[in-house]
Amino acid sequence: MTTQHTLTWFVTGSSRGLGNVWTRAALRRGDRVVATARDVSALKPLADEFGDAVLPLSLDVTHREAAFAAVARAVERFGGIDVAVNNAGYGLFGAVEEVTEAQARQQLETNLLGALWVTQAVLPGMRERGRGHILQVSSIGGVAAFPMLGLYHASKWGLEAFSESLAQEVASHGIRVTIVEPGPYGTDWSGSSAVHTEPIPAYDDVREARRAGAAGRTPIDPEVTAEAVLALVDAERPPLRLFLGGFCLPIAERVYAGRLDTWREWRSLSESADG
C-alpha cells in the first residue's frame, strides 16, 4: 500500500542534480516543496514554474541555526514537513595525505554535519505529528571506499552510521529513515561543485587509474531516478537503505563478501583476544 495525500517536502541542494530532479518530480505531481540552496537566486526557475507550491529558501547547511530557521519558516508556510531530503553535498577528490585541514573540515561540515543539523531541525515537528520520512542521500560510496575519495567516504559512512541509529530511535514515533545510495549519475558532484586537493606526485599513478576508470563509465541521466524516489516516499514501509541504479548491488556484494572472508580468515586471532 502507498500513501495518497499531498506531501510537503524539505529538500536541501534543490538547485541542481538529484535534488532538483526530485524537487521537480514532487511539484509536478502536486506536492509542495521547501526548496533550499546556498544561492537562492538559483531557485528562481522553480518559483517561476510552480508558484506558491514551492518556497525557495537560502540555506547553508553548515550553519545549524540557519537550518533550524529554515525549517521554522517551512512550518510557518506549509504547516509541517512530511519528507525531509538531505541532499546537499559535494565531492572532495584527493589522496588522504593531500587533504588540508580546511578541506577536511568543510567536507564533513557539509556532507555529514549539514545533514545532522537539518535532521535535528525537522525531528521535533515530525515527532509531534507522529509521522515523517527522512531521506539521507548517501552513495555507493557510503558502502564501499575507493582511492582518492577518502574524506568524501568518511562523510558518507558517518551519515550512514548516525542514520541507522536514528532509524531505531524514531521508529516508535512514526518516523521513517531511508539511506538513499545512488550510483554514478550525471550530476555536478564531480564537476564544478567538486573540490580537488593539491596533488602529491607519489600518488599520480593511483590518481590516473581512478580517472581512467571513471572515464570508462557513461553517466546515467539523473532524471530516471524521479519515479523511484516518489515510490519510495509513498511506500507504507520504506526500507532503511535503497540503492539507485543497478551499478551498486554487485559492488556491495563483492565488498561484503570480502569483509566476511577477512573476518573469517582471522577469526582465530580475533578469538584469542577473548582471554
Image: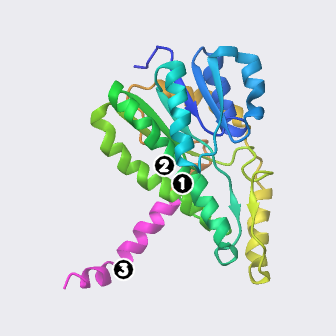
Total marks shown come to 3
| Residue in view at x 42 percent, y 39 percent | 177
Image spot of residue 74 (x, y percent): 54, 27
Observer able to see residue 110: yes
Quadrant location, the N terminus: top left
For this rendering, which residue is in front, 175 or 211?
175
Q: CA distance from mark 3 to mark 2?
A: 36 Å
Q: Is residue 22 above or below residue 95?
A: above
Amino acid bearing label 2? Leu
For this rendering, which residue is in front, 3 or 220?
3
Q: Is residue 258 left or right of residue 89?
A: left
The magenta span reads 253-275
Are dots 2 and 1 in contact, CB under 8 Å? yes
Image spot of residue 203 (x, y percent): 74, 79
**Applied colour scheme:** rainbow
The dot on residue 116 is: 2
For this rendering, which residue is in front, 251 or 194?
194
Circle 3 is placed at which residue position?
A: 266
Q: Is residue 63 magenta?
A: no
